[in-house]
Amino acid sequence: MIKLTKICNHSIMILNSKRVKIMNKIYIVTGAFGHLGNTIVRKLVALGETVRGLVLPNETSPALEGYNVEVVKGNVCDINSMEPLFACEEPTEFYVIHTAGIVSISSRYLQKVYDVNVNGTKNIIELCKRNHVKRFVHVSSVHAIPEPDNNQTIHEINQFNEKSVVGLYAKTKAIATQLVLDSVKDGLDAVIVHPSGIIGPNDYGHAHLTQLIMDYLDGRLTACVKGGYDFVDVRDVADGIISACHNGEKGECYILSNRYCSIPDLLNNLHQISGKKKIKTILPLWIAKATAPLSEIYYKLKKQPPLYTSYSLHTLKSNANFTHKKANRQLGYQPRDLKLTLKDTVDWLRINRRVKA
């Protein structure tokens, strides 16, 4: 059951020489109806934690139906609308997990992407400072990290510059990540995580990878392109983020990746799992690039995210040799086999009637 009332009933005890003080603990998750956001909320509720989720004023979703979470309507671009997130009559420790953002593979500039990913993060940082949060976990992206040459292993970095990365999404994530690191110098206790390509069940929206799987299962996908990326289970990313709330080091970044998988291999795994027709036509990237502008127009008319664009094709041929060893050591991060993720995703889509029987 989703609650819309004030929740301040989960407490921890702080001991000192004079008295025992009860301190409330609340987790705030922005973008709570999103794929990653709702997965984090579900896990926190299962752990018995008190959770407040921020969703857009006009946003509806079955993502958290039946879960004991307080939903707050607001917009990261409007700082005043988010003040109820921190309303509590008793002393409270707040843990803020900022997942709200726009993942865009568009090849053109969209002001809304900048407003949400950059200005929205500015507003969250300001509220965290005002309310002296215990820990702020910012969800960045591996796209914010510059791509080294010759398939060199990609590690965490501690300085971000939008000029070093390609594409609007990557640039906005780089700017926002640097804002968070700068706020650490001003005293904010913040940790940054960089997920790779998120995939998995519980996506009630239209994330690009979910749409790819749906198109394949429904027979709309008849060909694919060469190339691939690092794909990671949304549930593993959620576990890494929750661990970062307590085990991450202040001011540190953590890559939450899995392993590289080519698109043909991903679709072949789906073929083995679902029994659907195998995709045998593999197009060279240059053909896909030539038709990318038409693809964007076609999917815009269908009011669906485009299956591929010039930017997403650039990503599929980029260096995706990420290492998550740091997260392994410090967060206990252990991503699962991608085949398990794909099977669970197919099962979830079928159970929820998101694809044809």
Image (spheres, grey):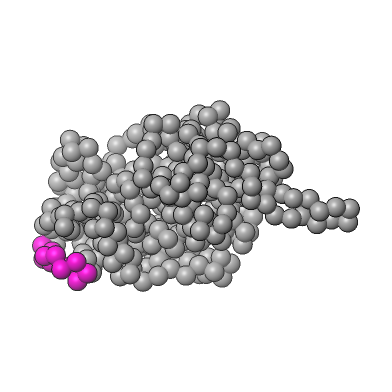
Instruction: State yes or no: residue 279 in magenta.
Output: yes
> Which quadrant would residue 180 be assigned to in this image?
top right
Q: Nearer the viewer, residue 110 or 129?
A: 129
Instruction: State yes or no: residue 188 in magenta.
Output: no
What residue is rendered at 29% in x and 46% in y?
A: 206
Q: Nearer the viewer, residue 88 or 322?
A: 88
Residue 41 visible here = yes
Q: Nearer the viewer, residue 265 or 134?
A: 134
What residue is rendered at 20% in x and 53% in y?
A: 355
Q: Is residue 24 left or right of residue 230?
A: right
How many discs appear? 0
What percent of the width, then of the height, locates residue 104? 34, 43
**Image height of 127 relative to 167, above or below:** above
What percent of the width, then of the height, locates residue 91? 72, 43
What residue is rendered at 58% in x and 38% in y?
A: 6
Residue 255 visible here = no
> Which quadrant would residue 113 be assigned to in this image?
top left
**Image height of 202 relative to 132, above or below:** below
What percent of the width, then of the height, locates residue 257? 42, 63
Q: Nearer the viewer, residue 22 or 199?
A: 22
Q: Is residue 293 left or right of residue 127?
A: left
Q: Which residues are magenta?
A: 271-281
Check the picture and name the quadrant holding the C terminus.
bottom left
**Image height of 304 relative to 288, above or below:** above
What residue is rendered at 33% in x and 35% in y?
A: 109
**Image height of 85 relative to 23, above or below:** above
What percent of the width, then of the height, locates residue 66? 43, 49
